[in-house]
């Protein structure tokens, strides 16, 4: 069974999520683990396709200053505030541990491999 990596944006009191997007082979173009160019800390960079990028742009604009989570199945891996709209369809997460980013990359890759085998 493969894990599901999900982006979700929470309501103002953070009790439930308003919208969510599963990161799958069909909407993730590239996932790389590297360093944040500004802080040299571990980072995960995700590039989405046009449809998922439009979802990210619309919802980060609409829910500015809300919390956005990234979860593997039901386990929250990252929780951050949306400080500005993410318009490009690419985003970088930094400041965590490289092990966490490798785990996210593996989960997205495993989901991609699973979906390719199923097709």
Image (tube, rainbow, N blue to C red):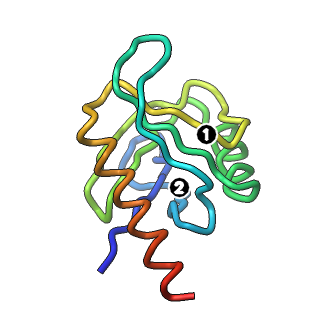
Q: Is residue 90 above or below residue 109?
A: above
Relative side of 49 to 64, left or right: right
Q: Residue furthest bottom?
A: 118
Query: Who's the residue at 54% across and 60% down the image?
Result: 21
Label ID, residue 91: none
Q: CA distance from mark 1 to mark 2?
A: 9 Å
What residue did someone put label 2 on? Answer: 18
Which quadrant would residue 96 be assigned to in this image?
Answer: top left
Q: Is residue 84 or residue 51 the one in the foreground? A: 51
Relative side of 54 to 84, left or right: right
Residues at circles 1 and 2 in contact by the CB criterion of under 8 Å: yes
Query: Who's the residue at 44% across and 58% down the image?
Result: 6
Q: Which secondary structure lies at badge 2?
A: strand
Q: Quadrant of the C terminus?
A: bottom right
Q: Quadrant of the N terminus?
A: bottom left
What residue did someone put label 1 on? Answer: 63
Q: In the rendering, at what x and y percent does residue 9 appear?
A: 50, 48
Query: Who's the residue at 70% across and 42% down the image?
Result: 57
Which quadrant would residue 50 be assigned to in this image?
Answer: bottom right
Q: Residue furthest top?
A: 38
Q: Is residue 65 above or below residue 5?
A: above
* N-terminal label among 1 and 2: 2
Q: In the rendering, at what x and y percent does residue 75 appear?
A: 25, 56
Determine crowd level at label 2: few under 14, some 14-19, many 20+ residues with C-alpha closer than 10 A.
few
Q: Which secondary structure lies at badge 1?
A: loop
Determine crowd level at label 1: few under 14, some 14-19, many 20+ residues with C-alpha closer than 10 A.
many
Query: Who's the residue at 31% across and 46% down the image?
Result: 102
Relative side of 34 to 20, left or right: left
């Amino acid at each position: 069974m493969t894990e599901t990596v999900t982006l979700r944006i929470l309501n103002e009191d953070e009790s439930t999520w308003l919208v969510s997007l599963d990161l799958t082979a069909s909407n993730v173009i590239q996932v790389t683990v590297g360093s944040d160019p500004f802080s040299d800390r571990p980072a995960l960079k995700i590039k989405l396709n046009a449809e998922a990028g439009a979802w990210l742009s619309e919802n980060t604009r609409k829910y500015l200053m809300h919390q956005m989570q990234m979860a593997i199945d039901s386990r929250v891996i990252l929780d951050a505030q949306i400080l500005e709209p993410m318009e490009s369809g690419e985003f970088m997460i930094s400041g965590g541990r490289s092990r966490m980013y490798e785990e996210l990359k593996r989960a997205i890759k495993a989901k991609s491999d699973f979906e390719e085998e199923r097709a």
